[in-house]
């Protein structure tokens, strides 16, 4: 294929056709196909010094941040590079090679790949290099070496893990490659995860069925241990490889929000968390925490309840602390699954204890109050504390749990601004929280009316946002809600309209560029706010990066660079927007971005710059764009 000038420059540097690397090509200018074409050349460079090595690092770093696209010839070239690297590397990065197969829209040349795949697989089997087993299975399908690979991969593994390997042996190479992609086997040069990999696995009915059978088998084994049918040994309920297989099955079932899953997890998790004896051990810490990590990836209210039941059941000293830490991460993550989060109960409780009544209310701030008839008491009465100490403790813990659930629900509602299409808000009808928010109703095509509460039935509804309203309407709503106490900033929400400078730059904003920030704090804030970013460091190619997040169907990127000091500082860069397009995303002009999407993205970037500022005065470095 004909390469652009930057792509040809990089290729010449990596192949040795060019030595001068004073003028360094901008890898962001490479097309996805050019990036895929250059990756084999980057792999062949190895440790060769000079411009070739720097071009390699630059190309590989670019491929870690965005999706390359491979032509059939590039796939073949990459497998040839894997073969060429065997004598010096004593290994082959099969995860990268197999990753190319699922990024080849024209279809990988499977027959032509058989010979290089056979060479690589035979070498790895001979050297006992089985650290990427599912990529190895995909390559075995190309090479015609299924039996040889299966023999080594199943040796010493438990029956649940063996069943997974046997399932994959019945699949063709593209499906095996897709499965390897979903597992994300370790590779420093792994491409970004395919955004739809679980959806594509979900289209494989035999794997959906396998996931259910796997979890039912795990639950049956734990039940047999508790029934005395299988001898109990601490942390020995599951054999080699089974923990990971169970975790993968749980991830798919949680992703699909399977209706049969809550009841199963309600039995499996408490059962796997406590010994059938009085011992302070449990059948499998590994499986308990593996499923908890799956819940962290794809949380549901019911799975969280099962984890809390496991936490209450266990007698192990360290497990409750670990589960508490994981639940603290899971609860905010649930806000990212807006429709699922809307299943959270509203938390209101009314319970009689003798002559007194405990009430957990959620009309404003979550409160546990105590009543005697119609009289509200200042605290739990002494008689209740003496006669019902366990219930008092349970209700206090429940109030804290409801407080966390309400916080999750608030985050989910606020995240609705970044959702396209709008979430099913009407599922929350009847919950006190919705009555303190402003809603918009499409009373006729294109005509929206704003009101407090979900009081207008049978028409489309969305959260009101000040970026869509006139200054007069915003002021009027602020007067209305001033004393109401909204669950999050809505009427008083900060708004970021497009500026004249941003209209001039067209495709990027440097409104928050040039701020010196504390990088560890910035990276932690990226994670907390749901942005994806590679961790930067003092290694080759590790000094620059982009944080990414989807807002309303658009991808927002925020660039940042480490500063060459020893204080862990970074400097902020540009904000850019990409619209959905065929085969990926396409850079967009700022004027095209919907006002709510632009405002919400810039509000987050403002938070990053302000909350992590390392120097007073903010902007200290020129933000001039290239």
Image (cartoon, helix red, strand yellow):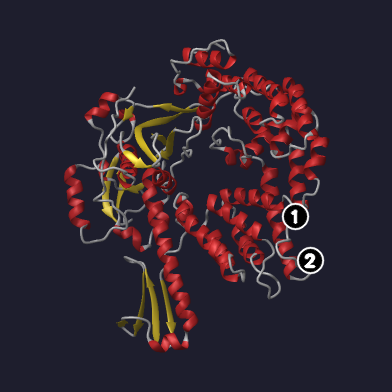
**Does residue 124 appear to the left or right of 178 in the view shown?**
right
Q: Who is closer to the viewer here, 586 or 582?
A: 586
Residue 502, above or below 515: above
Q: Earlier in the sequence, mark 1 or mark 2?
A: 2
Residue 261 at x, y = what percent?
A: 61, 57
Mark 2 secondary-structure assignment: loop
Mark 1 secondary-structure assignment: loop
Q: Residue at x 79, y 45 (%)?
A: 154
Q: Who is closer to the viewer here, 162 or 406?
A: 162
Q: Which residue is mark 1?
A: 239
**Does residue 387 appear to the left or right of 572 in the view shown?**
right
The quarter in which the C terminus is drawn is: top left
Residue 616, above or below 5: below
Q: Which residue is mark 2?
A: 230
Residue 69 at x, y = what percent?
A: 56, 24
Residue 249 at x, y = what percent?
A: 65, 50
Task: Report if residue 581 is visible in the image.
Answer: yes
Q: For label 2, count other residues whose C-alpha is less than 10 Å away and answer few (under 14), some (14-19) or many (20+).
A: few
Residue 398 at x, y = what percent?
A: 45, 71
Task: Report if residue 305 is visible in the image.
Answer: no
Q: Who is closer to the viewer here, 586 or 622?
A: 622
The quarter in which the N terminus is drawn is: top right
Q: For label 1, count other residues whose C-alpha is less than 10 Å away and answer few (under 14), some (14-19) or many (20+).
A: some
């Amino acid at each position: 294929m004909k390469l652009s000038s930057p792509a040809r420059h990089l290729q010449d540097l990596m192949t040795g056709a060019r030595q001068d690397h004073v003028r360094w090509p901008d890898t962001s200018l490479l097309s996805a196909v050019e990036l895929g074409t250059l990756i084999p050349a980057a792999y062949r460079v190895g440790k060769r010094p000079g411009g070739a090595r720097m071009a390699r690092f630059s190309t590989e770093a670019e491929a870690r941040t965005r999706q390359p696209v491979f032509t059939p010839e590039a796939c073949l070239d990459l497998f040839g590079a894997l073969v060429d690297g065997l004598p010096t590397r004593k290994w082959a990065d099969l995860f990268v090679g197999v990753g190319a197969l699922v990024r080849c829209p024209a279809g990988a040349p499977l027959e032509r790949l058989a010979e290089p795949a056979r060479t690589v697989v035979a070498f790895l089997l001979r050297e006992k290099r089985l650290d990427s087993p599912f990529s190895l299975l995909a390559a075995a399908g190309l090479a015609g070496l299924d039996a040889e690979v299966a023999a080594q991969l199943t040796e010493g593994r438990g029956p649940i893990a063996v069943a997974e390997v046997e399932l994959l042996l019945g699949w063709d190479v593209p499906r095996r490659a897709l499965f390897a992609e979903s597992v994300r086997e370790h590779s420093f040069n792994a491409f970004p995860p395919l955004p739809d990999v679980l959806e594509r696995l979900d289209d494989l009915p035999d794997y959906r069925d396998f996931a259910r059978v796997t979890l039912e088998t795990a639950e049956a084994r734990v039940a047999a241990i508790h029934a005395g049918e299988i001898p109990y040994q601490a942390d020995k309920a599951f054999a080699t490889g089974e923990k990971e297989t169970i975790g993968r099955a749980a991830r798919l079932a949680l992703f699909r929000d399977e209706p049969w899953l809550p009841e199963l997890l309600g039995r499996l998790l408490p059962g796997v968390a406590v010994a059938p004896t009085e011992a302070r051990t449990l059948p499998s810490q590994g499986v308990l925490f593996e499923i908890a990590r799956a819940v962290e990836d794809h949380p549901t209210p019911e799975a969280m309840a099962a984890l809390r039941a496991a936490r209450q059941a266990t007698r192990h000293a360290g497990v409750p602390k670990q589960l508490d830490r994981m639940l603290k991460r899971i609860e905010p993550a649930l806000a990212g699954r807006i429709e699922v989060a809307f299943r959270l109960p509203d938390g209101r409780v009314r319970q009689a204890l003798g002559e007194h009544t405990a009430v957990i209310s959620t009309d404003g701030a979550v409160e546990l109050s105590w009543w005697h008839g119609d009289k509200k008491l200042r605290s739990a009465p002494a008689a209740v504390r003496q006669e019902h100490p366990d219930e008092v403790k349970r209700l206090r813990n429940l109030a804290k749990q409801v407080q966390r659930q309400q916080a999750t629900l608030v985050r989910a509602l606020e995240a609705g601004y970044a959702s396209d299409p709008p979430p099913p808000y009407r599922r929350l009808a009847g919950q006190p929280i919705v009555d303190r928010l402003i809603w918009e109703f499409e009373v006729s095509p294109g005509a929206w009316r704003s009101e407090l509460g979900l009081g207008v039935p049978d028409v489309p509804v969305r959260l009101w946002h000040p970026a869509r309203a006139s200054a007069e309407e915003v002021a009027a709503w602020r007067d209305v809600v001033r004393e109401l106490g909204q669950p999050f900033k809505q009427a008083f929400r900060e708004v970021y309209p497009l500026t004249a400078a941003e209209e001039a730059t067209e495709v990027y904003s440097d409104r928050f560029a040039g701020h010196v920030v504390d990088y560890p704090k910035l990276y932690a804030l990226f994670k907390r706010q749901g942005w994806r970013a590679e961790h930067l460091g003092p290694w080759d190619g590790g000094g620059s990066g982009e944080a990414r997040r989807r807002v309303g169907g658009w991808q927002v990127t925020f660039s940042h660079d480490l500063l060459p000091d020893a204080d862990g500082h970074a400097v902020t860069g540009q904000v850019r927007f990409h619209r959905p397009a065929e085969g990926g995303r396409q850079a967009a002009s700022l004027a095209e971005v919907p006002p709510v999407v632009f405002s919400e993205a810039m509000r987050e970037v403002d938070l990053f710059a302000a909350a992590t500022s390392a120097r007073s005065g903010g902007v200290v470095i020129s933000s001039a764009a290239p």
